[in-house]
Image (tube, rainbow, N blue to C red):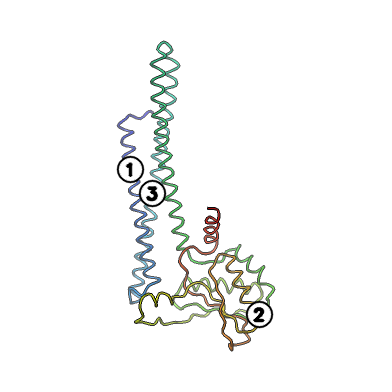
Amino acid sequence: MTLTDSEIGSLKAALNCWEWVGYVSTATVFLGCVGEFIAEFTRFPKSEQSKHKLARLSLMILILGIAGELLSAVHTSQLSGYVIADAEQKAAEAERQGGIARDDASHANERASANEKESEQLKKDAASLQKEAEDERLARVEIEEALAARRLGPKENALLQERLSQFAGEGVGIVYFGGDAEGFTFAWDLAKVLHDAKWVVPTPGGIIEMQEVGLPFDAAFAKLRSGVEVVDMGTPQSRQVAHALVDALNACGFDATTGSRSGNNVSTAVQIEVETRPLGPQGAARLRALARKTIR
């Protein structure tokens, strides 16, 4: 059924409304991300209970924003489909009428030309709306990847085992910051893959590290540690093992660096310190982001 001009106007008004819903939802997602950042990476609020409440509230805001973006994308896509279908139907009707009205060719050609222009404009509007919806989807994906926890999937497990099996029998200690749920999970992922590579791996342990208070903000922020640090024991073999492990983690897309502490327990080749999650994407998402930058 061909839509009237008033109905087309209503569709465009609805499209504009849902675009604003998408913008507000994106702002809501950003607000949720800011809350998560404050709760996870700053000293405020000072109490753990307040941090937990802020983190939960930020998560709910983030979920609400993402839901709004999804709802906006669905409705804009649906309304765009109505506009395109109406444009195609009008174009088909114009062509049919042009074939019938041969006795008034000049008038029919003018009307067909007008309808064709209107159809092209409607298609352009619909294409623009679809592009905006796709841009919003990509932006949402980037936000989700920037917040996703570090995990070792089948591909990462296979790569790490391939590179590290040559060091089978080496001892390793794994620690993480107590209270860091994301670090706890990633530490156990590392323990599992090294165990499968035949390393000597005890269960990961949590450590408590108190943040010094009273420092200037810039100095305190510079001391924040993130990623993974692989500490060797000062021997040539230990350094070789540490560098191989760091190279393998970097190849999987995870931030990892080496360190050295001579005089430690020589029965352990290296110690892995799983620190707080770095900002931005990690793992496969980080590799994809680097690949996009290289292509550009």
**Circle number at residue 170:** 2
Q: Quadrant of the N terminus?
A: top left
Residue carrying label 3: 71
User: Residue 290 appears at what percent x and percent y?
Assistant: 53, 59
Density class for disc 2 (Cα within 10 Å; few <14, some 14-19, many ≥20) is: many
Left or right, residue 3 beside residue 270: left
Density class for disc 3 (Cα within 10 Å; few <14, some 14-19, many ≥20) is: some
Q: Secondary structure at mark 2?
A: loop
**In the figure, residue 9 lies in which quadrant?**
top left
Q: Secondary structure at mark 3?
A: helix
Is 63 located above or below residue 268 in the figure? above
User: Residue 94 appears at what percent x and percent y?
Assistant: 42, 22
Residue carrying label 1: 16
Is 293 located above or below residue 239 in the figure? above
**Amino acid bearing label 2:** Glu
**Amino acid bearing label 3:** Leu
Seen at 37% across and 58% down, the residue is: 29
Q: Residue furthest right?
A: 166
Q: Which of the marked residues, 1 or 3, is nearer the chain's N terminus?
A: 1
**Amino acid bearing label 1:** Asn
